[in-house]
Image (cartoon, rainbow, N blue to C red):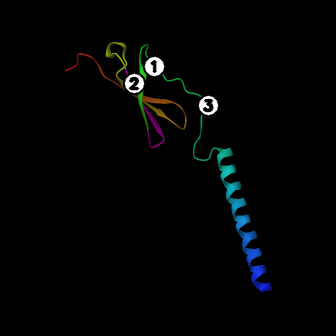
Amino acid sequence: MQALKLLVIFMAVLILAGMGLLAYGLVTRVAEGDGGGGFAAVDVPLPDGCSIAETAVAENRLILRFEGLAERGCQQVVVVDMTTGKVLGQVRGVPGAP
């Protein structure tokens, strides 16, 4: 019976140690920004009268779709690199194009 008590105590200590190491690993990865690169703020040019209609994330890129009047340049999609915060490109809808 004594051996069983010692085994249960030993296993409880192992579980607690494992949980502690897991928490430590998560905290250090978040603190280092592991895999995120991170950036503080990015200003994406948004024409007057336009709004962000939809967002999506694909392969470390943020894709923004604007909506509003085409005459104001609102019909466009902007792609932003989430690692650097740099605008990679824009696809614009041109009114009156065939």
Residue highlighted by disc 3: 40
Q: Which residues are magenta?
A: 57-67
Query: What residue do we see at 69% from left, 61% from top?
Result: 19
Q: Main secondary structure of the magenta part?
A: strand
How many neighbours does mark 3 have within 10 angstroms: few (below 14), some (14-19), or many (20 or more)?
few
For the residue pair 42 and 11, the one nearer the viewer reads as 11
How many neighbours does mark 1 have within 10 angstroms: few (below 14), some (14-19), or many (20 or more)?
some
Residue highlighted by disc 1: 46
Query: What residue do we see at 77% from left, 86% from top?
Result: 1
Query: What residue do we see at 60% from left, 33% from top?
Result: 39
Please give the label number shown on residue 28. none
For the residue pair 4 and 23, the one nearer the viewer reads as 4
Q: Residue 21: horizontal and vertical position, in percent?
A: 71, 60
Element under disc 3: loop
Residue 59: say if magenta: yes
Residue highlighted by disc 2: 66
